[in-house]
Amino acid sequence: MSTVSDRKSLFIILTVFLGVICLTYLISIMARGYQLNFQTGSGSIFKATGLLSATSKPKSASVYINDKLVTATDDTINLPPGDYQVKIVKDGYLPWTKDFHVNKETVYQTDTNLFRSVPDLKSLTLSGAINSTISPDYSKVIYAVASASATRDNGLYLIELTDNPLPIGRNIPRILATNFTFIDWSQFKFTFSPNSRQILATNSAGTINYLLSLDTPITAANLFDVTPRLSAIKTDWAQQSDQIITAKVDKLPSELRQLVSTSSATAISFNSTEDKVLYLAAADGNLKSNIITPPPAQSNQAQSRQIFKNNYYVYDLKDDTNFLLFNQSALQTQTPFWLANSNNIAFVDNKAIRVIEYDGTNLQTIYAGNFDPDTVYPWADGSRIIALISPYTSAPANLYAIIIR
C-alpha cells in the first residue's frame, strides 16, 4: 500500500521528467529558429524565424541589418523570413556587404573575411629580386640578386613561405648558390618542376639549361648542362603535371569535368577545405541543377549555370552552386588564386590587386601601386600577398609582403 511520501516522490519524479521533456522541446525548436510569440491574437505560441550566424575574421566587428546596428560578431541573430542586407564593419578594415534571403528554420552563416583598408608592407628582400618564380604548391619563391653594392651576396636565393609560428629563420631568404665564374644567375630564368623539388634554370639565349635540385647543395662541381636531355625532362614534367590535373578533375562531378580547362594545373584549383573549386571554362555548356542534393541553407546568391568558354567560375561541391567571377581577358596575365583559409580569390586587374568572394560578391581593391603584375603570389596562411614592388621611381624592385588580414 503506497504511502503519502511515495506518492509525493512519484509526483516530483513525473514533474521533473515532464519539465525535462518540455525544456528539451523548447531548446530544439528555438535551435530551429522559432521564438516565443508575444503578439496577442496571433493564435500561436511560437513564430518561425531563420538564423543568421554572423562570424568574422577578425572578430568583434559590428553587424548591421538593413543599416541598423544589431550586434557584434560572433553572434547568432533570429530573423523573420524575408530579404535582408547584412553589413559587417570594423575600424581599419574594408566593409563587407551581402544580401540574404532568409527562410524559416534555416541557418545561414556570413563567414566574413575582412581586409585591411590600409595594407602594411614588409620587405622580404633588400638587394632586388630578379626573375622571381613561385613553386606550383606556393611554398617557395626563387630569385636572383645582382647588386653592385652586395657583390659577395649576389647569386640564387630561395624564400620558403610558411605559417610556422616560430619566428626563428621564418621566411628569411637563404642563398642557394653564389655566382660562379661562368654563371651569373641574374641572366637566367627559372621554372619549377610540378612537384616543386627541382628547378630548371635557362639562360636568356635559351642555349644553356641547368637542372637544380633543392634537396642537395648547388656547387660548381654538380652543375651540368642538361640541354641534350631537355626534351625528355619537359616530357617527364608534362606527365607529372597531367597526373596532378587528373587528380583534381577526378574530384569533380562528372557533369562538370567536360567543361573544365585542363590546359594547366593553375586552370583548376581548390580552396583550403577543398569544398569549392575555381576553374577556367574550356567550352560552352549548361550545368544542370541538383547535381548533388543541396543543403537547406544553400546560398541564394545569383548563380550562373550556363557556362561560357574562357570565363572563371567557382563551383561549390557542398552547395551545388556555380558562380561567375570574370572573363579571362579581364586579367593582367596573372592567374587568379585562392587566399588560404578563406573563401576569397585574389587577382590582378587594372594595375591593382583585388579580391572577390567565391560567389562573385564583395569585389575590393586591397593594393594599388607600382608593382609587377606578373609577380603577385599568395602567402601560406592567406594573411598577406607577395608582390614585386618599386616603392618610388628608379627604386630597385624588391619582394614585399603585403599584409591584408
Image (spheres, grey):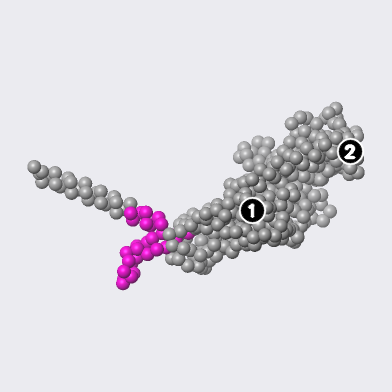
For the residue labelled by badge 1, is the local secondary structure a helix, a strand or a loop?
Answer: helix
Depth check: give the residue in front, 189 or 242.
242
Q: Tell me which amino acid carries mark 2.
A: Ile
Is residue 222 visible to us here? yes
Left or right: 194 with respect to 297? right
Measured from the top left, where is residue 279 in percent x and y? Answer: 67, 53
> Is-magenta flag for residue 48?
yes
Measured from the top left, where is residue 183 in percent x and y? Answer: 88, 36
Measured from the top left, where is residue 94 in percent x and y? Answer: 61, 60
Foreground label between 2 and 1? 1
Total marks in image? 2
Left or right: 114 with respect to 281? left
The magenta segment is 25-52
Q: Residue at x 70, y 56 (%)?
A: 281
> How many residues crowd around disc 1 within 10 Å: few (fewer than 14), some, or many (20 or more)?
some
- Rendered image: mark on residue 208: 2
Is residue 174 visible to us here? no
Q: Tell me which amino acid carries mark 1.
A: Leu
* Label pair 2/1, CB-CB below 8 angstroms: no
Q: Residue at x 26, y 52 (%)?
A: 19
Depth check: give the residue in front, 245 or 58.
245
For the residue labelled by badge 2, is the local secondary structure a helix, a strand or a loop?
Answer: loop
Farthest left residue in view = 1
Q: Residue at x 17, y 45 (%)?
A: 9
Q: Residue at x 80, y 34 (%)?
A: 212
Which of the 4 image quarters holds residue 29? bottom left
Left or right: 217 with respect to 33? right
Disc 2 and disc 1: Cα gap in Å? Answer: 42 Å
Farthest top residue in view = 221
> How many residues crowd around disc 2 within 10 Å: few (fewer than 14), some, or many (20 or more)?
some
What residue is pinned by disc 1?
A: 256
Measured from the top left, where is residue 245 in percent x and y? Answer: 70, 45
